[in-house]
């Protein structure tokens, strides 16, 4: 098989691992910022995560476009608009199809490293989302107590959005 494609796959894996490590670091910083309720830094981290995700998407597009044009593999058809977490799942098929038997363990190890980082990111994302939901619920309860409407139902839905309009209050409970 063409060494250029093999190098492209290997470099893509290394770059992906590096970028996902960077994204994981962003989620860890976000967790600390949420614990400290530092909203200014929260916006900065959000921008940083967006930039890292754009880099991940660019890297994936670069790698898979080059491979598609070189090999014209059938299972790449229509994958232009795949979200950033899905395209890397095509690596095992590529490793089996492209890489020689003696080199496969090295590529599989890199791929599973990437998958482990993605799993850790998913866990951190869930923890951070739960923290935000808990904080919004706490704020809602505090404002209910302050406004004297302690028995009023929660005004945020499952997506942390304002649920419905309310009567005019002394204090607005909208975030």
Image (spheres, rainbow, N blue to C red):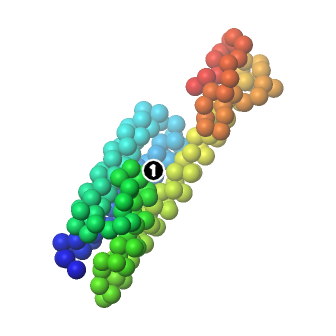
Residue 122, relative to residue 95: is it above or below? above
- Find numbered disc 1 in the image and state the secondary structure of the residue it sits on: helix
Residue 118, relative to residue 149: is it above or below? below
Residue at the outermost bottom position:
102
The residue identified by callout 1 is: 27
Residue 50, relative to residue 119: is it above or below? above
Residue 150, relative to residue 13: is it above or below? above
Residue placed at 57% from the left, 45% from the top?
A: 129
x and y percentages locating residue 148 in the rendered image: 77, 18
Point out the image quarter for the N terminus.
bottom left
* Residue nearer the viewer, 102 or 125: 102
* Residue nearer the viewer, 47 or 25: 47
Q: Note whether residue 104 is visible.
A: yes
Does residue 126 appear left or right of residue 62 in this picture? right
Q: Note whether residue 25 is visible.
A: no
Decide: few, some or many residues near mark 1? Use Cα within 10 Å; few <14, some 14-19, many ≥20: many
Residue placed at 46% from the left, 67% from the top?
A: 116
Point out the image quarter for the C terminus.
top right
x and y percentages locating residue 83 in the rendered image: 42, 51
Residue placed at 33% from the left, 61% from the top?
A: 16
Asked where in the image residue 105 lies, by quadrant, the reply is bottom left
Does residue 61 appear left or right of residue 122 in this picture? left
């Amino acid at each position: 098989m063409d060494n250029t494609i093999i190098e492209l796959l290997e470099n893509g894996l290394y770059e992906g691992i590096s970028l996902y490590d960077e994204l994981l670091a962003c989620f860890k910083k976000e967790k600390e910022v949420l614990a400290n309720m530092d909203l200014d830094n929260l916006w900065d981290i959000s921008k940083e995560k967006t930039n890292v995700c754009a880099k991940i998407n660019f890297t994936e597009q670069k790698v898979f476009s080059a491979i598609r044009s070189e090999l014209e593999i059938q299972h790449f058809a229509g994958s232009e608009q795949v979200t950033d977490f899905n395209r890397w799942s095509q690596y095992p098929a590529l490793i089996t199809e492209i890489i020689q038997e003696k080199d496969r363990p090295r590529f599989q190890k890199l791929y599973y490293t990437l998958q482990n980082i993605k799993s850790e990111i998913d866990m951190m994302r869930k923890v951070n989302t739960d923290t935000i939901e808990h904080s919004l619920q706490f704020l809602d309860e505090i404002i209910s107590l302050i406004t004297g409407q302690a028995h009023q139902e929660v005004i945020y839905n499952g997506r942390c959005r304002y649920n419905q309009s309310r009567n005019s209050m002394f204090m607005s409970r909208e975030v």
